[in-house]
Image (cartoon, rainbow, N blue to C red):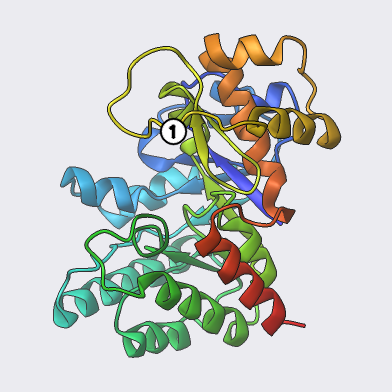
Amino acid sequence: MKVVLGTPLNAVPRPWLYFHVPAVMVNALEVKRDPRSALGFEGELWIDSGGYQILKKGLTVDVDKIAEIYRRVDAQLYFSLDVPPSPSDPLEVAEKKFEKSYKNWERLRRALGDIVVPVLHVYREEGLFLKYLRKYSDAPALAIGGAVPYVLITRGVPRGSRELALRLISIARREFKGPIHVLGMGSPSVTPILHAMGIQSTDSATWRLKAAYGKVILPGGGERHVTSRAVSFGKAKPKDGELEELYRFLMETGFPALDGFYERIRTSFEYRALVNAWVVVKSWSQTPRAPAFRKLYLQVAAARR
């Protein structure tokens, strides 16, 4: 399974300078110059339209502006400009957003061709999801967005939202013939489940954010705070044997910078970020650590046998 690393253009560290990264994704709203030159990256480049950031910041971005950016950036994949519905949106509001996302894709497809991938959003009304899944049936590839609050956050969404989102993704995988990418679901707790479903790819930008908060990501999911500074949330410290487990995973999978591991994860943000990026990219074949995700993984794996 391909796990794509999301990154700001000016960010450090740059994991692709230390080891192979399957693909890197950047935000179209940040593209003021050649992304490859800015990143020092020559591999597979994906461009996200910034739909989620536009929503969160209350911005207005015309679809023609996104088309202009896409025309001047040499990338392997471009996501359509989407309008994400909130889990709390009434049905009529959500449907307007679904329709706007669809019309944006139609315009970008006419302008740029099939290299633009439409984004279909998880939403609590299954019928709405299925209606637009059928509309995208002739797309060469499909992205599924909006799953994060249902699967990884779950506050403010109905009970059973995790199962709902995964069921919708599973339906899409069964009915859509081309490759599917699930946006923002590159947590090692979830990537084994997506892989078991037959999903081709997902992405994560949290490898840097967790490192900045003093945390390392464990294979199979979960994060542990390893620095000495005080934190206001996510205070879980490593349990007995967990850092040793992480070290063994890195060693067995070929991580290229193990010297001084225990000291460097405690003192160096950049080193933690490299470790986290490696874990995110490499641990999709691990059984999820958390009981809830492990149960879902085993159910999905058993259903596909």
Q: Which quadrant would residue 198 be assigned to in this image? A: bottom right
Residue type, mark 1 in image: Ala
Q: Relative to residue 260, is residue 4 drawn left or right?
A: left
Residue in front for this viewpoint, 140 or 289: 289
Front in this rendered view, residue 73 or 276: 276
Residue furthest front in the image = 240
Residue located 32% across and 69% down the image: 101
Q: Give the x, y percent position of residue 15.
A: 65, 26
Asked whether the viewer can see residue 244, the reply is: yes
Q: Residue at x 55, y 14 (%)?
A: 266
Q: Nearer the viewer, residue 213 or 32?
A: 213
| Image x and y of residue 64, in percent | 32, 54
How many numbered tags mark residues here? 1
Say left or right for 199 vs 100.
Answer: right
Q: Position of residue 303 (x, y in %)?
A: 68, 84
Category of crowding for the residue at label 1, using alpha-carbon neighbours closer than 10 angstroms: few (below 14), some (14–19), many (at least 20): few
- Quarter of the image for the N terminus: give it: bottom right
Mark 1, residue position: 236
Image position of 93 (left or right of 267): left
Q: Is residue 37 visible?
A: no
Q: Quadrant of residue 131?
A: bottom left
Residue drawn at (74%, 55%), measured in percent from left and top? 285
Secondary structure of the residue carrying numbered label 1: loop
Position of the C terminus by quadrant: bottom right
> Residue at position x 70%, y 37% from top?
21
Rendered position, 126 above or below 120 = below
